[in-house]
Image: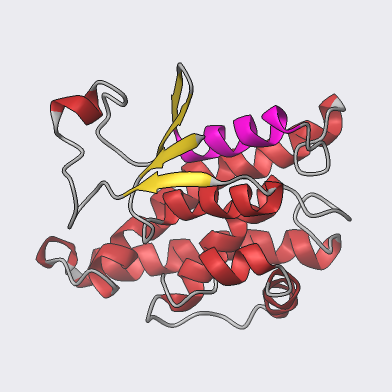
Amino acid sequence: MLKLLGKASSINVRKVLWTGHELGLPLQREDWGSGFRSTQQPEFLALNPNGLVPVLIDGERVLWESNTICRYLAGREGRHDLLPQAPGARAAVEMWMDWQATDLNNAWRYVFMSRVRQDAAYQDAARLAAAEREWNRLMGLLEHQLAGGGPYVAGEAFTLADVVLGLSLNRWLMTPFTRPDYPALGGYLQRLQQRPGFRLHGANGLP
């Protein structure tokens, strides 16, 4: 049995849950994180010294970093539709996954902490406005990618890039702030909503 450590409301845990659903893999999940068992406990830090969820345990193998876990599970199950074998096709998927984990994640943090978490440390008006502009700008890059190709991020087929970016799109739409009208993203959302895994772990009322 694969064990997944992390609370179900975490966006990074939900990436893994959605991937598991696409793969038909049962994941035994344990609640860890704010509101549950602390990830600063020694037993958790022994698994992930960063003290962050999710953590995947597969026998003797322990993995952290949500995008890496998603890639591992797809490879473990031989799902080359989700993570292609051909170097160029695989690189196209991983390029967008890495962009999500670096550029896009960094862009939304201030806005999310201010608008959703209502954290007092994230209420500087100028910084908030700049962060909102940057988040919208980066989502505009995704809009451009989908408008010029698609119907999915890496081309004709649904891949792991759509799992991680689908959850990012959901967070962008669920955060209360002013967004541009991006029609390609609207069409993309409709396609994702046809997938049961997205309905369970993405479009499920959680940002």
**Residue at 72% from the left image edge and 78% from the top image edge:** 190
* Front residue of 167 and 55: 55
- Measuring from the top left, give residue 202's x and y in whole percent: 54, 66
Q: Position of residue 16 (x, y in %)?
A: 53, 47
Position of 186 relative to 122 (above/below): below
The range drawn in magenta is 65-77
The residue sitting at 48% across, 55% down in the picture is: 14
Name the residue located 62 percent from the left edge and 49 percent from the top edge. 19
Residue 65 on image: x %, y %:
45, 34
Which residue is at a point 75% across and 37% down the rendered structure image? Answer: 83
| Quarter occupied by the C terminus | bottom left
Magenta-drawn stretch contains 72: yes
Q: Give the main secondary structure, helix, strand or loop, of the magenta stretch.
A: helix
The figure's colour scheme reads secondary structure
Whether residue 164 is in magenta: the answer is no
Tell me residue 92's x, y (percent): 77, 39
